[in-house]
Image: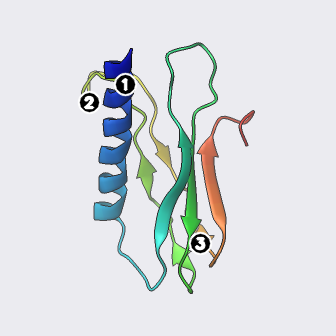
Amino acid sequence: MRRAKASRAAMLFAATLGISSIAPWASGAIVINEFTYDDGSTDDREFIELYNNGGAAVDISGWVVRNSDTVAPPTDNNADFTIPAATSLAPGAYWVIGQTGVL
């Protein structure tokens, strides 16, 4: 069980690196402020909360969050989430990615 949790945490960290390598950074700074990972149960309470701790708005349009279990792509069937076009995160603002019940 611990190994599975550590694996999921490592994958989320890898996703963070993927986000940072894709996005051209403006003068703001987007961080993952909070998250809940899939604990293996049947609920869908997982989420990621982005936060702009910078002094300027940051365009996060097109950023992709990869939803993946321990199976490497492209063999998994989990959907990715792409932040919609024209989405800007103002200074001090949050953006939550998750199921409707979480938001």
Q: Quadrant of residue 74?
A: top left
Amino acid beneath label 2? Pro
- Specify which label sits upstream in the sequence, 1 or 3: 1
User: At which x and y percent is residue 82?
Assistant: 49, 50
At 57% from the left and 64% from the top, the residue drawn is 51
- Quarter of the image for residue 72 reads top left
Residue 98 is situated, as x and y percent measured from the top left of the image, at 61, 40
**Label 3: how many Cα within 10 Å (few below 14, some 14–19, many 20+):** some
The residue sitting at 62% across, 58% down in the picture is 95
Say which residue label 2 marks.
73
Q: Is residue 29 left or right of residue 99?
A: left
Answer above or below: position of 73 versus 55. Answer: above
User: SS at mark 1?
Assistant: loop
The reply to whether discs 1 and 3 touch (Cβ–Cβ < 8 Å) is no
Name the residue beneath numbered marker 1: 69
| CA gap, disc 1 and disc 3 | 29 Å
> Does the residue at mark 3 contact the one at mark 2 (Cβ under 8 Å)?
no
- Residue 69 in which image quadrant: top left
Quarter of the rendering occupied by the C terminus: top right
Labelled disc at residue 88: 3
